[in-house]
Amino acid sequence: MMRLAGYPEESQAIHRVFFNEHVARSLGPYPTKMKDRLLWHSFMTDDHTPLEMSWSWSDDSDTPVVRYAAEPIGWLAGTASDPLNSKATVVCLGDTLPWAPSLDLKWYKHFLRSLVADTKAEQSPRTLAAEPPSQTFIAFDLEKESMTVKYYFLPALKSTVCHKTNLELIEESILKMPEADNSLTSCLDTITTYIRSQTPDNELHVEIFAIDCVSPADSRLKIYVRSRNTTFDGMLDVMTLGGRTSKFSDETVGSLRELWCACFSVENTTEAMSQPLKNKNHRTGGLLYYFELKPGAKMPTSKVYLPVRHYAESDDQVARGLSEYLLKRGKCLNGRLPYYDGVAKLW
């Protein structure tokens, strides 16, 4: 992936060393077909693979940045010695120091205390370990000679122990930050008001909270929510927080329509776009969004994840559609290689 994205050989070598020595070795026991009840079922992906890799394009460059996220898993995760898999991620985070000069753990320490349950939780370790719940992920954006670290918190276990909702727990944790100035609290209020205004049919389920492990002045706070509403207009409503943020331009809406059609093989007609995607009764069905807050920002921003795994026709259809979408915007891999051809090389 790094080679196809145009990373120099020396950059590839730097990141391979870190991945091989500190990430690959922290992904737990090799998976088998045996259904061992102590096996740690990561929430990272639908098939429990504790690793997810991606290319990320932006306006800054025609070629992508390589990113990946992982849930480090200890060899004793889910046992009495490590019932909540509390150790592996901490070790992996410490290992990043030589590769991440911008690493700042102030917010990490704050939210670790607020959002992660430990083995002294009200429930016994045996009860908690019966079906091990993921609580943290770690992610890396690969730069030429270093990387930026991001941290993800899944507060469901902690909120259960505290008898609160995920939203309540995250909201309280943010408001306790020293950096929670008027702009940040105002943005948070905009988000929470919108989430709580939803009807039961359009409920937004708060699932994940994330931070950048950099200086608080440069970091972001991200609140991830899932919606079972899979209509295009429903997506636009969530992304603008029901009109509470700036209205999307016609160009932006048109681009989103094109992406929707490319990913889900939907005709770009009013009738087709008004229909929900096919029903998918799966834990990760629906659309996933995040709302982003940042100190000093006047309004929150948003992004949407389109779950092609559940709603696309096939891998080939998605790859072709996305490749065409990217090429129209001048986005490609190194040497003007189309995305589709790059995926074919990886496959």
Image (cartoon, rainbow, N blue to C red):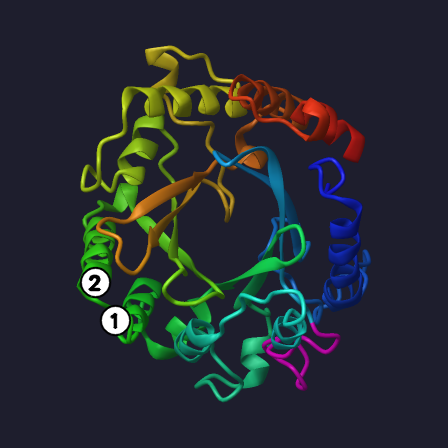
Q: Which residue is mark 2?
A: 185
Residue 173 to residue 313: above or below: below
Residues 38 and 107: in front is: 107
* Residue 99 appearing in the image: yes
Asked whether, in this view, residue 164 is left or right of residue 61, the answer is left
Q: Residue 93: where, in percent of width, then height?
A: 61, 71
Are the two marked residues, 2 and 1, in contact with CB atoms closer than 8 angstroms? yes
Name the residue located 18 percent from the left edge and 49 percent from the top edge. Answer: 197
How many other residues sit within 10 Å of disc 2, few (<14), some (14-19) or many (≥20)?
some
x then y, percent, for residue 203: 29, 47
Looking at the picture, tell me which residue is in the foreground, 241 or 203: 241
The residue under label 2 is which amino acid type? Thr
> Which span is picked out in magenta?
74-87
Residue 77 magenta-highlighted = yes
Q: Is residue 110 left or right of residue 265?
A: left
Spot occupied by residue 163 in the image (x, y as percentages of width and height): 32, 75
Q: How many marks?
A: 2
Q: Nearer the viewer, residue 178 or 34?
A: 178
**Which quarter of the rendered picture does the N terminus lie within?**
top right
Would you name the residue on which mark 1 appears?
Answer: 175
Q: Main secondary structure of the magenta part?
A: loop
Q: Nearer the viewer, residue 205 or 63?
A: 63
Residue 14 covered by magenta stretch: no
Secondary structure of the residue carrying numbered label 2 = helix
Query: Mark 1 or mark 2, which is nearer the start of the sequence?
Result: 1
**Tag 1: residue type?**
Leu
